[in-house]
Image (cartoon, grey):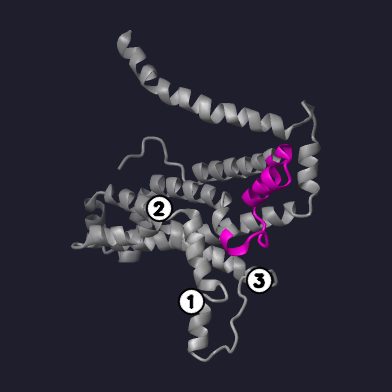
């Protein structure tokens, strides 16, 4: 009896933690999103959906995730493959690649702001090369695509390492015998990567893509540092409605939208990259 109860007792602290710090806040946010002045109402959702910034905030957020995540996946796979094959200096290279992980979102945004602002590194370099006479306002409201590009670069620089670390761990679990067998049968390095590495890496790819995609939906500090309110995103609008406009019901509606697209993305990756039953390394 005690042995049967032990797993449940071990899970109890985590269950209580989730109930207190996830389920309870989630219920509170859901109630706020579907109420006004203490009674049921769809007015917060209507206000959010008809606001002129909602469509653009949703569009920019989804576009940012659609651009950043595939690029980071390709870079993380390349970097993880290189690191895994290193015979010497592997730990040093891994530490160097992981340095941006030590920076907060806001710090990463400020680093790239120092590059793109009028008195920044990029303008100084262009002026030093004689390519421009006056500093260029790269991050002005009229250059929204340059702001988007700066955010993409900052996100790639800051968060690719987290995917790489997960993939390096997954590659380390793939038995060498599979690659040796592939070599024996004449498989090229690309064929071994496609036929052995990628299929065996499914659980790690699943974790990396879910974590990175959800983080892309929640991007805020980097966008605020580089573009202020010029480039609207869902998290920025949530903050704006909560603190600037003092309407926590609409802010809760935005939070529900972020939660909804996060759940859809998670279910998509769980479905597409699911591991067949009974499959083991």
Residue 172 image position (x, y, % from top left): 27, 50
- Within 10 angstroms of label 1, few (less than 14), some, or many (20 or more) residues? some
Q: Quadrant of the C terminus?
A: top left
- Within 10 angstroms of label 3, few (less than 14), some, or many (20 or more) residues? some
Label 3 sits on a secondary structure element that is loop
Residue 217 image position (x, y, % from top left): 58, 50
Residue 41 image position (x, y, % from top left): 80, 31
Report the magenta residues as a range: 225-251
Residue 121 marker: 1
Image mark count? 3
Residue at image mark 3: 140
Which is closer to the viewer, label 1 or label 2? 1
Q: CA distance from mark 3 to mark 2?
A: 31 Å
Q: Tell me: residue 127, above or below residue 97.
A: below
- Within 10 angstroms of label 2, few (less than 14), some, or many (20 or more) residues? some
| Residue at figure coordinates x 50%, y 69% from the top left | 114
Determine if the magenta segment contains residue 25.
no
| Residue at figure coordinates x 68%, y 38% from the top left | 252
Residue 162 marker: 2
| Residue at figure coordinates x 69%, y 69% from the top left | 141
């Amino acid at each position: 009896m005690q042995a049967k109860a032990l797993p449940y007792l071990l899970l109890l602290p985590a269950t209580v933690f989730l109930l207190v710090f996830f389920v309870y806040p989630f219920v509170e946010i859901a109630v706020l999103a579907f109420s006004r002045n203490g009674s049921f109402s769809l007015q917060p959702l209507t206000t959010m959906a008809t606001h002129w910034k909602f469509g653009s905030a949703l569009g920019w957020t989804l576009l940012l995730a659609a651009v950043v995540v595939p690029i980071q996946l390709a870079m993380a796979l390349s970097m993880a493959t290189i690191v895994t094959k290193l015979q010497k200096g592997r730990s040093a290279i891994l530490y160097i690649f992981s340095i941006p992980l030590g920076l907060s979102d806001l710090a990463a945004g400020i680093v790239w702001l120092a590059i793109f602002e009028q008195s920044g590194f990029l303008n100084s370099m262009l002026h030093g090369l004689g390519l421009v006479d006056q500093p260029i306002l790269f991050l002005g409201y009229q250059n929204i695509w340059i702001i988007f590009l700066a955010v993409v670069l900052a996100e790639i620089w800051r968060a690719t390492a987290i995917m790489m670390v997960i993939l390096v761990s997954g590659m380390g679990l793939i038995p060498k015998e599979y690659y040796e067998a592939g070599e024996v049968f004449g498989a090229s390095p690309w064929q071994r990567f496609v036929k052995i590495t990628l299929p065996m890496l499914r659980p790690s790819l699943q974790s990396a893509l879910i974590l990175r995609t959800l983080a892309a939906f929640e991007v805020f500090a980097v966008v605020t540092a580089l573009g202020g309110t010029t480039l609207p995103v869902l998290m920025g609008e949530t903050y704006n409605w909560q603190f600037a406009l003092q309407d926590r019901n609409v802010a809760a509606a935005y939070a529900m939208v972020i939660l909804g697209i996060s759940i859809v993305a998670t279910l998509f990756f769980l479905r597409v990259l699911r591991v067949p039953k009974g499959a083991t390394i």
